[in-house]
Amino acid sequence: MTWQTKKQLVKLLVDLVEHASITGSQGEIALAEYLYSLLKEKKYFQQHPEYLQLHPVPDGRSFLTAFVKQVESEETVVLLSHFDVVEVQDYGDLTDLAFRPVELTQELKKRNAQMPKAASEDLESDEWLFGRGTMDMKAGISVQLAMLERAMSGEFNGNILFISVPDEEVNSAGMQSAVPVLDELKKRYGLTYKACVNSEPMFAKYPNDQNHYIYTGSIGKVLASFYCNGIETHVGEPFSGLNANLILSEINRLMELNDSFCEQVGDEVTPPPTSLMMRDLKQEYSVQIPHASVSMYNLLMMNRPFSELHKKLVNVAKEAAVNVERFYQDRVQRYNKFIPFTPLDRKINVFTYKELLQKAINKYGDQEVERRINSLLTHRGVEDDRDFSTKLVGELVGLCKEYSPMIVLFYSPPYYPAVSSKENELIQKTVDRVVTHAKKVYQIDLKQQHYFPGLCDLSFVQLHDDRQSIARLTTNMPLYGNHFSLPLKEMQSLNIPVLNIGPVGRDPHKWTERLHIPYAFETYPELLCFSIKSIFNEDE
């Protein structure tokens, strides 16, 4: 076996990191092929080539499955990982070294005085390897490949299905393509998926958090969006119109850091919403007021049904509408002291995307609305999913201008359902055994967390929301069915218990991203192996 010792695993990690697999790049495509070529050299897959496959993602990328089957066993543990990484502009003049971890770590030692204190201390210890992807998550892939080797040698009393996907860092297109394949493989080989184990690294809950974590679920995310359409006018006649930025600013005041959106499960709390984008949609400077604007908010979820979240967001839009109407009337009264005039009616309508779409259909008919949407899709080019969602909403707003001013609530990709196996007996038993083992053998206190806080592809192997609740999302997502979709049927069919146990790292998505080598390649492989054996109910 070639990936079992610390030295072998460090070499494998460096090889993987040196493939600059930034999401959407040629390097991401190349790394899938490299993983395939590594495993193709293994005797097991030469004897069973049908168990090793590259699968296409519709956009030209690929994901990899590698299946190691034990005779007369249907019980299977899925090992899940992603091989894409985020971009590297944050490295500045070190960008050329971002994917050369050995050289980068040596260069940083020459610049130790410029490093943040915690990173500097880790650097001086000589136990950490720096570089993009070292922590997130090519160390996890390396150790999973080591487990795959052990499976080939017959170490586990069950099957191992290794799956590694692209695009986790942006839209999870790789995992969404992989879910139907997981379902198909389950049926083809008559498998029982005992658990899906991810190897995402531990995420610090606060600065300098030294705790070690094991996760029995993953947090959910939705991108809630508000399109605000006002009434255009010349800036010299501001009371003849209504500035869309005024409406947007009130929505932002109500949404930003609003703790009523927080959820708490035990000692875990979701952060409040925060704006990811907020802008007017004027293309160039002019003395016409901005009459269209949009904002998008990051919302994280645990137990809350999506239908409940949707209702809260609609209520925010309605509250913002009332507040702006009152504000406008107050400003009219103040200006009336200078020039008396009769104000225009400025009632602000609130619609969901589904409601606005139906109004457009009622006015123009199904075929005309479909024709307009298809025309936009045909000429989309390389426009980002978020921007293109906004454009689709704007098209419907243009068809229904008589309802302006208005606020339209809609959703943009990506969407991550919250998943949890905290109530699953096998997962909880496994966690209890791993926690006890880590304490006994390594004097490490592993703390169980119900939700991995960094978002991950585990979100797509379960689906707990009912169909009616999920429909609140899908019917109000302009891109749903028009380039973006979720394998909802297969997610419900799979319903795999989940577990995340990974290496120790620091500063994901920062230029100081780094991996603790002793834990990653001495302690962690044994803990992951122990976890897999526990899932198969093997004796200690």
Image (spheres, rainbow, N blue to C red):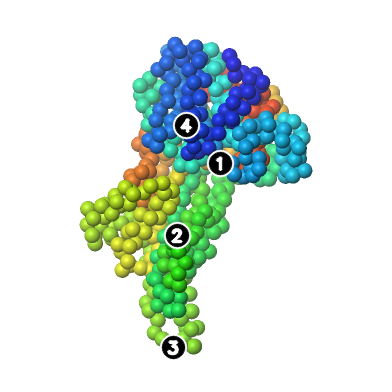
Label 1 or label 4, whichever comes before in sequence order: 4
Give the spatial CA distance, label 3 vs label 2.
Answer: 33 Å
User: Residue at 76% of width from left, 33% of height from top?
Assistant: 125
Residue 465 vs residue 84, the one in the foreground: 84
Residue 418 vs residue 347, the one in the foreground: 347
- Residue type at the position of mark 1: Glu
Q: Which residue, given by chain and number where applicable, does mark 3 sit on?
A: 340
Residues marked 4 and 2 touching at CB (< 8 Å): no
Q: Is residue 340 left or right of residue 530?
A: left
Q: Quadrant of the C terminus?
A: top right
Label 4 or label 3, whichever comes before in sequence order: 4
Give the spatial CA distance, label 1 vs label 4.
Answer: 15 Å
Label 4 or label 2, whichever comes before in sequence order: 4
Residue 271's disc number: none
- Residue type at the position of mark 3: Pro
Q: Which residue, given by chain and number where applicable, does mark 2 sit on?
A: 294
The kind of secondary structure element at disc 4 is: helix
Give the spatial CA distance, label 4 vs label 2.
Answer: 34 Å
The kind of secondary structure element at disc 1 is: loop
- Residue type at the position of mark 2: Val
Q: Which residue, given by chain and number where applicable, does mark 4 sit on?
A: 29
Q: Which residue, given by chain and number where applicable, does mark 1 sit on?
A: 87
